[in-house]
Amino acid sequence: MLPYLFHLGRYAQPTYGVMAALGLIVGLWVVFRLARQQGLDPDKMWNLGALAILSGIIGAKLLMILVDLNHYLHHLDELFSVDTLL
């Protein structure tokens, strides 16, 4: 597998980021189609999907902080840095 899809100057697009985004889009599309077939409100399914994605991102960041809690307790300035939030 290619680690990067393309390079533009100093920027390199990682393959895993594109694949993760593609997986999320396809997953939401499948949920949307199945909801319509089952007679469920597709708008509520989009909202549920967005909420699940946001919850996953927040949960992953919280777990990252909990795993390295000792480090973040000694470096509180890094807790809200851009590197931690991205």
Image (cartoon, grey):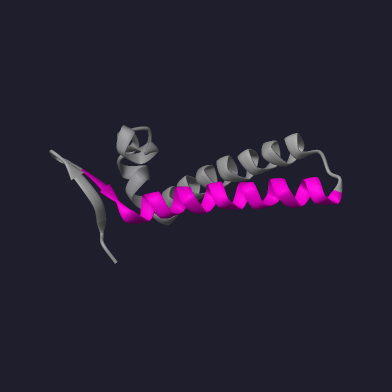
Residue at 81%, 50% in the rendered image? 37
Q: Chief secondary structure of the magenta span? A: helix
Magenta stretch in the rendered image: 12-38
Query: Horizontally, is 5 left or right of 22 in the view?
Result: left
The quadrant the C terminus occupies is top left
x, y (%) of residue 61?
46, 46
Residue 11 visible at all: yes
x, y (%) of residue 60?
49, 50
- Judge whether 16 appears above or below 48 on screen: below
Residue 43 lies in quadrant: top right
- Judge whether 80 appears above or below 59 on screen: above
Residue at 79%, 45% in the rendered image? 36
Q: Nearer the viewer, residue 77 or 2?
A: 2
Q: Is residue 17 magenta?
A: yes
x, y (%) of residue 14?
29, 51
| Total marks placed | 0
Residue at 32%, 49% in the rendered image? 71
Residue 19 lies in quadrant: bottom left
The quadrant the N terminus occupies is bottom left
x, y (%) of residue 34?
75, 52
Q: Is residue 57 magenta?
A: no
Residue at 26%, 59% in the rendered image? 3
Q: Residue furthest right?
A: 39
Query: Horizontally, is 34 left or right of 72 in the view?
Result: right
Q: Residue furthest left?
A: 9
Query: Horizontally, is 9 left or right of 23 in the view?
Result: left
Residue 69 visible at all: no
Q: Nearer the viewer, residue 43 or 50?
A: 43
Q: Nearer the viewer, residue 40 or 59?
A: 40
